[in-house]
Each structure stands twice: as C-alpha cells, then as structure tokens.
Image (spheres, grey):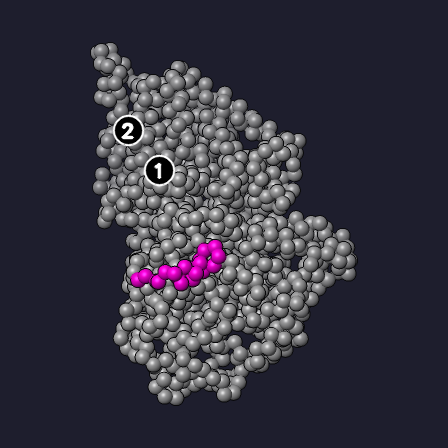
C-alpha cells in the first residue's frame, strides 16, 4: 500500500512537468502582455519597459521558464503581476469559498440524486423512473450561466429569499454564509445531480441483477430491505469515483458560477488572471489545481481499495 | 466577463449638459439637491458601493488601472480638482498662478493634516513630485514629464519649473498625478502602501481595511480640514460584482446602494424603477475606431473617407447606445470647453461613399477586418456597422478579441480597423495629443498617422495658454481629423450611475469619479 | 435487464426524433427560416413574440426564430465536429499507447493526464485565446479537452483485446501489427468509443455555450444557440424571448442527445 502511494506520487511528477510546460507555452503564445493589460491607458513606454525588465518579461521564454522552475523548486510560486502579492496568498484567499461551494454543491446533488436514483432503479421502467431520469437531466441540459441568472431572478429579485451576489464565510456566520452559497450551490449541484443519479441508477441496476440479491429475495426479504442491505452498498463505489473526480473539477472549474454570483473563488481567479495575462498567477494556480486534481484521484483510488478489497489485490 | 475595457463615459454640449442636470434633478439624483433644500443632510450610515472589478493597488503613484481612482478620490486629494463644468478649482492648493509659460506656482492650504496626523505642507508636496519622478515603479512618470524640478518657496508655497510649456498640466494634476501621500507613511511602510493606505491621505475618508476579493472599507475622517458640507457617511464599503446584470439586480434588491455604471440597455428599465435613482453623468470619453494608415486598405485616404461616409452615426447611437450618448464629431467630448459644436459629425452619404471608393480605385468595394472587444455592446455595434457598410458594397469581417489581445494588436499595428474606447481626460490634450502626434515611443497612436499640419497644431495647443485660443486650435484640429481620419469617431457616451433612493447629494462630475464627501443617506 | 432496456427505449424514440428534427432543421435552414437571420431592423428591436415574429426580435431587430434555425447548424457542427476531433485523435493516441506500450505509452498517457488535470473550461479558454476566436478555434479547443477521455478508453480496450487468444493466433500466423490493429482491435474497441462519443456531443454543445459566455466563440454575425443566449442574457428582464428561443432549442436538443446516448449505451453494453 505504502509503495503504491509512493509509486503513484512519483508518477505525478512528469504529469506536473508537462502541465507547467504546457501552461507556459500556451500563455506566451496568447497575444497580449501583462504590462500592457495592466497599464492600458498609459503611454509611458519607459515605465512599461522598466517594469517588464524588473519582472524578467524581456528575457527569452525558455529563460523565463527556467527561472520560474528554479524558484518553484525552492517552493516559491512567485508574485502576481497585477496586485504584487505572492501567488500562494492569492490562492489561499480564494480556496476557501471554492471548497465550501464545492462541498455544498455536492450535498445538494446527493440530496437530489439519492432519492431519485434509488427510486428510479427500484421502480425501473415505470413512469416514476422516466420522470426521475428526465428530472435529473434537467440541470445538466442548461448552460449554467443561464440557470444561475434564472435562479437569481426567481429567488433573489422576485421572491427576495436569498442574496443575489457576494460571499459570506459560513464558518464565521453559518446562516448568512449558507444563504450566500445556496444559489450557486444549487446551480452547480443540479448539473452534478444528473451525473450522480445516472451513475447510481445504473450501478444499482447492475447490483440488482447479482446472485446475492436473488438469494436475499428468495429468503423473503422485502424489496426495500434488499436494496438497503445489499444493493446500495455495492452500488456506492462508482458514485464515490464520480464524486472524487468531480471535486477537483468543482474547485477549479466553477468559473462561471463564481463569476455570476460574484464569489471570490479559485475558478474566477484563473480566468481573471488569464484575461490580465498575469503569467505567474496563471501558472501557479493551474499548477496547484492540477496537483489537487491528481491528489484527489489518488485518494479516490485508495478509497476504492478500502471499500472493496478485491480491487486492491487485482 | 472581459468587462475591464468598457467603462464608458458621457457627452453633451454645454447647454445640453445643463439641461441634463435640470432633467436629472427633476427625476432623481440631483433631486437630492432639490430635496436637500427641504431636508438637512444627516450624518451616519454605511454606503455600500458595487464596482465591476476590484482595485489593483492603494498607491496612487503606482496605479495603472482606472477603478483605483474611484477609491482614491475619497481617500486622497489632488492639488486642484474639477467642478461639474470641468473648470479647475482649488483642492489642496488654495490658489495658483503662472508667471510665465514654464513656471507654475501653487499656494498650499494651511491646516491640512494627513490621516496619520502629520502636516501637509510644501515639503510634503515636493516629496510627492520627487517620488512620482524617481520611484522605479512609478506609473506617473509620463504625466509629470514636463516638470523639470520643484522648488519650495516657503512652508506653504511650491514652484514647478517646467521643461516646456504644458497647458494641460493643471488638468493632469486633478487626478492621481496631483494626489498627495503622507511622506511619513511612504518612508515607514511604502512597500505595504499598495495594499494598506492607512494614514496615507488627507481626504474626507480614511482607509480602514481591504479584504482582498471581498471588500474595501473606508471611514469618515473626523478631523477633515474642510468644515463645509460633508463628510456625512460613517463608512463606505466597496465590493466587486463582475456581472453587469447581477450588479444591477443587487442594487434593485437593496444589497448595495450605488453602482458605477448602468448599461444603456438597462437605462430605460432602471429609470422606471422607483427603487432606483439614475444620474446620467456626461463623460469625457470618446469611443472610436482607429484606422491603420500603415497598410492597405486604409493607407488610402479615399477609402477611409468612403468608410466614414458609409457609417450612420445617428442610427448607431440610437439603435446600439439607445441614446445614452451622442454622435461624435471628433475626439473632444461635448462636456469639454474645447468642444466646437459648429462642427457636425460626418454624415452618412452613400453616393459620396461610392465616389470615394472609385477615387480610391476600389469602385467595386473592398474588404477589411474590424477588431473589437468581445463584449455584448461592442458586438452589437460591430454587427450594425457591418450591415451599414455593406450597403456601400464594403465587406467588413469581425474579429472579436479580449482586452489584452486588443491592446497587443493595437500596439503592434496588427489590424485594419480597431475599437478604441478612451475614457477621456479633463483637458482636451488628453484626448488628442498622444493619439495623433507623430512621436516615436508614444503607444496610443495606433493608426500610425504622421501629418505635419496636425503635429504643429497639437504643439501649439500646448504652448498657448489662453483657453479661447486653444479652443480655436482644437476646432481646426477636429476639422482636419475629419478629413485625414486616423479614427472614425462614433459616440461620446453618457455614463449613467444608479443609486438607491436613500442616497442624497451626489454631484456628477464628468470625469465619472464618485466623490462621496457630500453624500448622505436618508 | 431486458425490461430495463425497454424502459430506456421508451425515451430513446423521443431522443431520436429530436435529433432527426435538429438535423433536418440544420440542413433545411434556408427553406425553413422565415427571415434572413442577419437582416436588422433597429426600429423593430426587442419586439415581443407575435404573428410577424413568432419568437420575437433581438436587440438589433433580427428575427429570433430565424436565428435559432440557422444557429442549429453552428451548434450541431460545434458539438459533433469537436467530438469527432476528440474521438479520432483520442483513439489514435490510445491505440498507439496501448499497442506500442513502453515509453510511448508512458509519454502519451502522461500527456493525457496533464490535459485532464486542467480545469476543462480554463484549458478551452486558453487554447481558444491562442487559436483565435471563431468556430475553428472552438472546435479544436473542445476537441483537445475531450481527447484524453477517448485516449484512455481506447488504450484500455486495446490492452484488453490484445490479450485475447484470437489476437495471439493472428500474431502467431505472422500478421503485421497494423493489420491486427485494423482487423481485430479496432472493430472490437469501437462500441465504447461510440457510446462515449454519443454522450459527449451533448456536453460539447453546452460547453460551446459556456465558451461564448467567457467571450470566446462564434464570430458575428454568425450565431450559435450559445452565443445567442449570451448576447441576450443582459435582456433577461426586458426581453426574455431573446434567450427563450435558443435556450429551449439547446435544452431540448441536449436532452434528446442524452436519451439517444443512453439508448446506444444500453444497446451496445448490456452489462449496464
């Protein structure tokens, strides 16, 4: 087990190298320049040139990459060009809202997906099943910026139940914090619910066809007890996988939701940084997101082996 | 999303402007003024302000982004300030005189203290100018380039010695280049000033805290030097809301009290909303397209003129800007004293456009690409222009880019016709010189125009100090620009701001900055 | 299991009908659209849905219905072509990795892992910025984003299939590698790729809409449903019909594609 973890960790190094090189190349191929973007209305060529020099932007790209790598190996991700603060500070400020949003979105999606998925599987091929499956699809079939705007219009503007924009930390103010995150969490959670419902339903159907279920039924157990006692547990593995894979995506990828609801999250940070051509910030954030993604994958794999020992020995 | 580049501003002739104020007062905001006669301003309360993006730095000397200024104008004060008609009035300087065209003497106000308790005086002012000129990261260098040295005449008088006559300098000193920072704060924690301006300014409000990505808080300066009027508000809380629609909805729902800008498409609806008061703030802006004089097709003057005559500005301003702005006759906005209202915007004339096409050797029409920002209103304008020029058998392709790419394409002259939305400067020099003067090294002359007649006119506007004289020169310049066409000028937008009806006493100055000194909450 | 498939099958005809309708609309756009989708009438901007304009007009007075009809083409092309790019590129890389093994395998799969570990929208955004806006940029950007999924899938299939006896037999008979790949591996590995592709198209159509939101998409005056929704989102309160037309078209098509994708999966992969 320990060796497996070490092996997997070692395997992430080349991946991360490729990620950093890829980001670097992409960013520098993109037209535009951080200093011009920052000082759009300034004609001060001299000031711009001296800033570029100070930031090393006047050097050839491979030298810039090497310099960045050297700093990285010392554990320094550099500073944002726009606000001059260390990349790591920028990210650590933004990670909390993103994490809270991701977890809440998952909670929302599970609240929807479990009842719908279980009932759909148990009452398969009935109208209930079809209604459930179709409902679960709802969230995934609409662009999420549209869904977000509709939710704001309904719950924020018309009914005035929930705040429209902004972020309150639920750790500091639980009630207001949850209220500020609820609409964005629903926006993300509806889409996720579709994926989870689908996964849960099919893995339950698969489990329902297994021999031990037939045995349990033969013993005269009620259908509900069969599901609860035998099917659900076995059907959970794929659900855990999906959740694990989605966590990474939710944290770094909730760009549009964070933008619309004015939440200070990581996803918006990357996109703002891309638009500002804030090279060190984009590089640093993407690297951290990639690392997070890889680690969460690793965690899922380990969790797998723990839930189902057969997998470990395969 | 790439909303960074669009921060429109406004227009109007002087008379229209007065009318606008009158209309506004009848409807809403300056209605504050009317109500104010009946109702005395009240102290207290927190004003919640929504801006499209967060500030970049709290150090006015290092600031390169426009949104920073919105906050500075409440914390810091410049030597001189603007009035509603763009006249220059005393700020931290009580008065000024110009013994000759290369000398400017300021008499400074006594009894002004920075928020850290130190005195503002001539030494402090000189310190600030020195810092702007010598600090390696200073972004103000270009703006104070004409200043050669600063002499302290006595504790409350300074003399600026200029390298060359600079008629626009006073107007420049109404903004960041004229803002005074406490020398003590700079010396003791200059490096930190960018994110923490505590004690640094002299303005009606003091910096309290800035929780990045969340909010920036300032509070009333209890010992503000000016005892007339405000500050009334206890605190002002700024927060960034990037999406226009969501920002407006937050205002309508009462989550915030002020927003910096209302999109033209929302203006009519918002004016009908009793929960919101709108002020049309005429701006200094000039929205145009630069034409590339260094390559075909627009190195051909006749083709530039053909394009200009195929545009219907009235229709663009009515259909795209919904009349939240006015057709432009040139780079100088109607808010400016230098605006010449006898010059009409270029009229649509398809027959003339065709004649010019023939003159330019392209009687069958030609094809070019417009590069513009990927923002809804820009796209809409591009689509309307595309349809207009097609009627003159000109084929226009549209290339949509984000703000950073637009700047890079412009600076490298990689375009035929490119959108240029200039937020404007209080002195007409700021809307003209750097765009049309042949100067190697200036980066806003994207068109590449180099015309000796224009150059000499521009130089004269800097040397002559009489406003009447300068106005005549700018009139001449505008006519010349309509002929040479380094740009096709489209619109001088109005920059509507919206408030909760509780907000009283806002004075709309055309530079678009929101100064909250005299603002109070009902 | 049979029952389950039958249950899904009752949704599948609906999905298929939607898909066929969408394709027909895309092909027949010039005949079906009541107006020129580019014809502006600024005087008639934001007209409510009515007899003259069934879905109303947009902010520069263009007929929304006609634009939705023409937008079908762009949206379907964006969805299908980007997935086709991804499926072809991913399959080739997967075959290469699975069949060659060793270093090539390691390199290809690490590269795929690297692509996967980007937030997809951010990757598409950055790629799009490099490639320039426009349908081509969008296709390639989305294609790259979806490639790793196909590569992984294909590699897994190749590894499973090459371990089977008939492949060993073919190899023993001296058949060249490409021949084995072509005749034995590809046909057997195809079904899961088809399933994945059918489900990905729906996501790609949605992703194109998201890219439009971020300012990267179709160049005007052309329009996809996504870019129309994006252009109209500022008018949600004054003129919701601008968004309603393309929004409904997008929603129904994506639902239909999902049903079809599920049906294909059920048909090809009886285990589920």
Q: Which residues are magenta?
A: B25-43
Residue at the spot 43% in from the left edge and 48% down from the top edge:
B274
Relative depth, front residue between B40 and B490 = B40
Residue at the spot 62% in from the left edge and 39% down from the top edge:
C37
Image quarter (top left, top right, bottom left or bottom right) of the C terminus of chain B: bottom left
User: CA separation, marks 1 and 2?
Assistant: 23 Å
Residue C5: where, in percent of width, then height? Answer: 42, 18
1 vs 2, front mark: 1
First in residue order: circle 1 vs circle 2: 1
Residue at the spot 56% in from the left edge and 66% down from the top edge:
B14
Is residue B131 within the magenta segment? no
The residue beneath circle 2 is A236
Residue A159 seen by the camera: yes
Q: How many marks?
A: 2
The local crowd at label 1, few if under 14, some if 14 to 19, many if 20 or more residues have their Cα within 10 Å, is many
Quadrant of the rendered image containing residue B159: bottom left
* Mark 1 chain: A
The local crowd at label 2, few if under 14, some if 14 to 19, many if 20 or more residues have their Cα within 10 Å, is some
As helix, strand or loop, the secondary structure at mark 1 comes to helix
Is residue B28 within the magenta segment? yes
Q: Which mark is residue A186?
A: 1
């Amino acid at each position: 087990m320990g060796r497996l973890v070490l092996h997997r960790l070692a395997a992430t190094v080349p991946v991360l190298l490729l990620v950093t090189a890829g980001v670097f190349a992409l960013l520098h191929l993109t037209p535009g320049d951080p200093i011009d973007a920052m000082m759009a209305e300034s004609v001060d060529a001299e000031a711009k040139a001296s800033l570029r020099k100070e930031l090393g932007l006047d050097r050839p790209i491979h030298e810039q990459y090497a310099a960045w790598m050297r700093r990285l190996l010392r554990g320094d991700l550099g500073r944002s060009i726009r606000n001059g603060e260390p990349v790591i500070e920028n990210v650590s400020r933004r990670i909390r809202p993103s994490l809270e949003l991701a977890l809440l979105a998952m909670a929302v999606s599970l609240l929807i997906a479990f009842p719908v998925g279980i009932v759909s599987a148990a009452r398969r091929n009935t109208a209930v099943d079809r209604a459930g499956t179709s409902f679960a699809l709802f969230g995934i079939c609409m662009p999420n910026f549209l869904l977000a705007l509709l939710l704001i219009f309904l719950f924020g503007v018309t009914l005035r139940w929930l705040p429209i924009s902004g972020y309150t930390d639920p750790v500091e103010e639980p009630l207001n914090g949850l209220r500020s995150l609820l609409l964005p969490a629903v926006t993300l959670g509806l889409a996720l619910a579709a994926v989870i419902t689908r996964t849960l339903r099919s893995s339950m159907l698969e489990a329902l066809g297994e021999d031990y279920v037939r045995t349990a039924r033969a013993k005269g157990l009620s259908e509900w007890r069969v599901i609860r006692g035998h099917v659900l547990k076995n059907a959970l593995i794929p659900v855990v996988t999906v959740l694990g894979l989605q966590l990474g995506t939710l944290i770094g990828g909730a760009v549009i939701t964070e933008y619309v609801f004015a939440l200070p999250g990581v996803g918006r940070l990357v996109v703002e940084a891309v638009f500002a051509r804030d090279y060190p910030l984009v590089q640093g954030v993407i690297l951290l997101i990639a690392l997070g993604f890889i680690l969460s994958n690793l965690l899922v794999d380990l969790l797998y082996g723990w839930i189902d020992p057969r997998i470990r020995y395969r | 999303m790439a909303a960074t580049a669009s921060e429109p501003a406004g227009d109007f002739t002087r008379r229209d402007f007065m009318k606008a104020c009158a209309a506004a007062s009848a409807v809403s905001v300056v209605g504050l003024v009317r109500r104010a006669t009946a109702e005395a301003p009240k102290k207290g309360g927190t004003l919640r302000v929504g801006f499209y993006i967060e500030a970049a730095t709290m150090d006015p000397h290092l600031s390169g982004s426009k949104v920073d200024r919105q906050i500075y104008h409440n914390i810091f004060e410049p030597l001189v300030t603007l009035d509603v008609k763009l006249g220059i009035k005393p700020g931290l300087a009580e008065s000024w005189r110009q013994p000759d065209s290369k000398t400017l003497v300021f008499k400074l106000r006594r009894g002004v203290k920075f928020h850290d308790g130190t005195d503002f005086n001539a030494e402090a002012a000189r310190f600030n100018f020195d810092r702007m000129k010598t600090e390696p990261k200073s972004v103000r260098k270009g703006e104070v380039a004409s200043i050669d040295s600063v002499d302290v005449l006595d504790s409350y008088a300074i003399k600026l010695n200029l390298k060359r006559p600079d008629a626009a300098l006073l107007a420049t000193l109404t903004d960041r280049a004229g803002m005074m920072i406490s020398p003590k704060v700079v010396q003791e924690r200059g490096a930190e000033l960018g994110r923490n301006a505590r004690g640094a300014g002299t303005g009606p409000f003091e910096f309290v805290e800035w929780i990045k990505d969340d909010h920036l808080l300032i509070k009333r300066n209890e010992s503000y030097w000016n005892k007339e009027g405000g500050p009334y508000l206890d605190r002002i809380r700024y927060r960034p809301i990037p999406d226009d629609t969501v920002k407006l909805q937050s205002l309508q729902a009462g989550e915030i009290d002020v927003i910096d800008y209302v999109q033209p498409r929302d203006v009519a609806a918002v004016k009908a909303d009793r929960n919101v008061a709108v002020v049309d703030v005429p701006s200094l802006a000039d929205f145009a397209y630069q034409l590339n004089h260094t390559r075909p097709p627009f190195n051909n003057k006749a083709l530039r003129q053909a394009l200009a005559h195929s545009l219907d500005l009235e229709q663009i301003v009515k259909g795209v800007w919904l009349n939240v702005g006015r057709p432009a006759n040139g780079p100088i906005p109607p808010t400016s004293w230098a605006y010449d209202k006898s010059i009409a915007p270029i009229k649509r004339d398809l027959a003339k456009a065709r004649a010019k096409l023939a003159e330019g050797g392209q009687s069958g029409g030609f094809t070019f690409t417009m590069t513009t920002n990927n923002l809804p209103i820009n796209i809409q304008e591009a689509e309307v222009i595309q349809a207009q020029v097609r009627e003159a058998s000109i084929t226009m392709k549209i290339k949509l880019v984000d703000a950073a790419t637009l700047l890079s394409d412009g600076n490298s002259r990689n375009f035929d016709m490119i959108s240029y939305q200039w937020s404007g400067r209080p002195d007409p020099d700021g809307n003209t010189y750097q765009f049309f003067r042949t100067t190697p090294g200036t980066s806003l002359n994207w068109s590449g125009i180099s015309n000796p007649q224009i150059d000499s006119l521009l130089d004269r506007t800097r040397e002559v100090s009489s406003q009447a004289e300068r106005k005549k020169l700018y009139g001449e310049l505008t006519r010349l620009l309509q002929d040479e066409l380094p740009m096709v000028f489209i619109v001088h937008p109005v920059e509507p701001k919206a408030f909760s009806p509780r907000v009283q006493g806002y004075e709309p100055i055309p530079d678009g900055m929101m100064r909250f000194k005299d603002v109070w909450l009902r | 299991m049979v029952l389950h498939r039958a249950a899904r099958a009752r949704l599948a005809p609906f999905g298929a009908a939607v898909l066929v309708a969408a394709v027909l609309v895309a092909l027949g756009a010039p005949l079906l659209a009541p107006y020129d989708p580019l014809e502006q009438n600024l005087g008639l901007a934001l007209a409510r849905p009515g007899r003259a304009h069934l879905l109303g007009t947009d902010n520069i007075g263009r007929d929304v219905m006609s634009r939705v009809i023409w937008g079908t083409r762009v949206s379907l092309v964006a969805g299908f072509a980007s997935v086709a790019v991804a499926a072809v590129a991913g399959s080739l890389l997967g075959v290469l990795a699975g069949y060659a093994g060793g270093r090539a395998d390691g390199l290809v799969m690490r590269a795929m892992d690297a692509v996967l570990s980007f937030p997809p929208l951010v990757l598409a955004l950055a790629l799009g910025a490099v490639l320039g806006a426009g349908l081509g940029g969008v296709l390639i950007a989305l294609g790259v984003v979806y490639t790793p999924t196909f590569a992984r899938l294909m590699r897994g299939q190749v590894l499973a299939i090459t371990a089977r006896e008939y492949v060993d037999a073919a190899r023993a008979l001296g058949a060249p590698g490409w021949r084995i790949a072509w005749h034995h591996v590809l046909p057997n590995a195809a079904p899961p790729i088809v399933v994945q592709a059918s489900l990905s198209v729906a996501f790609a159509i949605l992703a194109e809409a998201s890219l439009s939101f971020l300012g990267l998409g179709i160049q005007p005056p052309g329009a996809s449903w996504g870019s129309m929704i994006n252009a109209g989102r500022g008018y949600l309160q004054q003129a919701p019909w601008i968004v309603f037309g393309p929004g409904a078209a997008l929603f129904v098509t994506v639902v239909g594609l999902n049903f079809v994708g599920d049906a294909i999966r059920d048909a090809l992969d009886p285990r589920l």
